[in-house]
Image (tube, coloured by chain):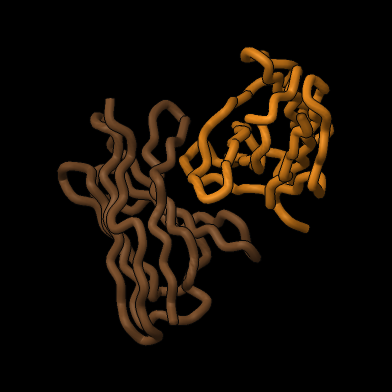
Chain colours: A brown, B orange
Amino acid sequence: KAGVTQTPRYLIKTRGQQVTLSCSPISGHRSVSWYQQTPGQGLQFLFEYFSETQRNKGNFPGRFSGRQFSNSRSEMNVSTLELGDSALYLCASHSHNEQFFGPGTRLTVL
Amino acid sequence: QKEVEQNSGPLSVPEGAIASLNCTYSDRGSQSFFWYRQYSGKSPELIMFIYSNGDKEDGRFTAQLNKASQYVSLLIRDSQPSDSATYLCAVNSNGDYKLSFGAGTTVTVRA
């Protein structure tokens, strides 16, 4: 069974731009979560989607948003990028309370 | 107080020794506990999860949970150089999929 896939793997943007990251969960998994990982703050929960509905949201500003499609694929969007948004963005696919992470998207904001 | 705290590293152990990693959590209602391993430049991979008080063994790994003390640990027996990584403790409090992670403990196994 294929694992979680994320695209793109690397991204460089400038301040003020917006970015969209994509995640395809493991086949059959209907729930997806997003996390941000930085050296200073570690791994922080962004949001979780199940059957196209956001079920949970972390403490991030409204510039961070997401959605899930009927095929369980998910996207997250960050608008008006700031330098501090530079991070590894991880998507996790869920089954029976176990979470499996994708390879991540490394976002650099210049 | 952080939700999940791990013993500060880095932790250096000789090959073949036992590496002991500790984690405490603040939410007494926490239900599920996970240990992830993350190699440098890679994403976290699930090693073990534990829900009930006591020990759970999987190969060279043993997770120990004490809910009364709000403490979870991971023992790595017969440590190998390939175990050199950052180990992340994660806690789930509400039965949903939101995980709170500790800062991680970096382990180096010396050959």
Q: Position of residue B30 (x, y in %)?
A: 65, 37
Q: Which of the pair A106/B51 is nearer the observer?
A: A106
Quadrant in the picture for the N terminus of chain B:
bottom right
Residue B6 in the image: above or below residue B60: below
Quadrant in the picture for the C terminus of chain B:
top right
Residue lying at 71% horizontally and 19% vertically, measured from the top left: B62
Determine the image quadrant of residue A101.
top left
Give the side of residue A11 with respect to residue A40, left or right: left
* Res. A56 visible in picture: no
Q: Which of the pair B100/B48 is nearer the observer?
A: B48
Residue lying at 62% horizontally and 48% vertically, measured from the top left: B101
Determine the image quadrant of residue A29.
top left
Give the side of residue A94 with respect to residue B73, left or right: left
Q: Where is residue B37 in the image (x, y as percent from the top left)?
A: 59, 37
Judged from this view, the residue extending furthest toward the front is B111
Q: Where is residue B92 in the image (x, y as percent from the top left)?
A: 58, 40
* Res. A44 visible in picture: yes
